[in-house]
Amino acid sequence: MSERPMANRWKNTFTRADITPEPLWLNRRAVLAGMASAGALGGAVAAQEALEPNTWEEITTYNNFYEFGTGKSDPADNSGDMITDPWEVTIDGMVDNPGTFSLADLAADMTMEERLYRFRCVEAWAMVIPWNGFELADLLNKAGIQTGATHVAFETAVLPDVMEGVQRRVIDFPYVEGLRLDEAMHPLTIMATGVYGRPMANQNGAPIRLVVPWKYGFKSIKSIVRITVTNEQPPTTWNKIGPREYGFYSNVNPEVDHPRWSQASERLIGGGLFSSRQDTLMFNGYPEVASLYDGMDLTTNY
Ligand SMILES: Nc1nc2c(c(=O)[nH]1)N[C@H]1C(S)=C(S)[C@@H](COP(=O)(O)O)O[C@H]1N2
Ligand SMILES: [Mo]
């Protein structure tokens, strides 16, 4: 059974060193469903297999990437000219080993995994995406986090020649995001470089983007060129645009509505004729992160 992935219940994902093309995903799902009903791996597999991944087509044609325009099809239509290889990432701030590194060198040192994650946009649509990437914690540990650091800031490339949304200044660029250090170090937080075992499509944030599955999608910043370890809460793009609407934390929470719409339910992209609405889950279905927020009021810290 070399095709059998490791079931990893608490990560709400499968972890494996190699990659799985889309047809194998579908095949594996069928095999696992059979195994689960036969009790081979028990409930863990059954729980994971309840996550039906969206198709490559869905994942790469319905996007938010304002550098390439504000429409859902703009990123797929307009991002083709972005050159993502070679690519450099600067790691700076409160680290022992700052520098500007080629992504190829950085990634070669990391343990690549496949993570099947729910993905929830603040606009109340959702997908399930099989990312390939590595834990951000591994990268930060290699960089050497210095005492006193509390947060990590991220910045997207600004390439006006190929980013028409940057030319038109649809919002303020560079797009910036941030996490508290413990959020950044959580094993669910990954740097993704691929989807379905294929290199990340430009519209999904090639060649490297953040994925924080328990937070609204805008926290998962794309096409990253700088990672800064700091001792201050960094400014974040959507919080700057609408501080009452988009907080720093932006944890998925069915009980805290956006001022202009409910967050109690979400529309699952795809699914054929019946585009299904489903309940929003606290922390997007990742309760293992709850302890990060012990003692915090998640209504005011939205
Ligand atoms: N640089 C950058 N990162 C970004 C965005 C963006 O406009 N620019 N949009 C965010 C939003 S709102 C969402 S929902 C996700 C969408 O990721 P996807 O298109 O891969 O599904 O990317 C996030 N990361
Ligand atoms: Mo979003």
Image (cartoon, grey):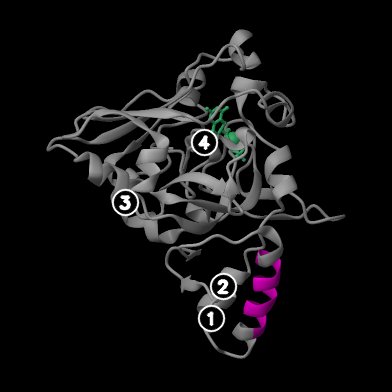
Is 159 left or right of 63, judged from the image as shown?
left
Relative vertical location of residue 219 with respect to residue 8 in this rendering, above or below: above
Cα separation between marks 2 and 1: 6 Å
Task: Residue under label 1, please give it.
Answer: 43
Point out the tag, 3 or 1, that comes first from the N-terminus: 1
Cα separation between marks 2 and 3: 24 Å
Relative vertical location of residue 142 with respect to residue 84 in this rendering, above or below: below
Judging from the image, what secondary structure is the residue with disc 1 in?
Answer: helix
Relative vertical location of residue 161 with respect to residue 101 in this rendering, above or below: above
Cα separation between marks 4 and 2: 31 Å
Tell me the residue at 49%/33% (across/down): 221
Boundaries of the magenta span: 25-34
CB under 8 Å between callouts 2 and 1? Answer: yes
Between tags 3 and 1, which lies in front? 1
The answer to whether the residue bearing label 2 lies less than 8 angstroms from the nearest atom of ligand 1 is no
Residue placed farthest to the right in the image? Answer: 273
Point out the tag, 2 or 3, that comes first from the N-terminus: 2
CB under 8 Å between callouts 4 and 2? Answer: no
> From the image, which quarter does the C terminus lie in?
top left
Tell me the residue at 48%/37% (across/down): 208
Relative vertical location of residue 260 with respect to residue 55 in this rendering, above or below: above
Q: Which amino acid type corresponds to the residue marked 3 in the rendered image? A: Leu
Task: Residue under label 3, please give it.
Answer: 292
* Main secondary structure type of the part rendered in magenta: helix
Residue 215 visible in the displayed image:
yes
Q: Which amino acid type corresponds to the residue marked 4 in the rendered image? A: Pro
**Percent x, y for residue 5?**
52, 72
Task: Residue under label 2, please give it.
Answer: 47
Crowd tier of the residue under label 4, counting other residues whose Cα lies within 10 Å: few below 14, some 14–19, many 20 or above = many
Quadrant position of residue 60: top right
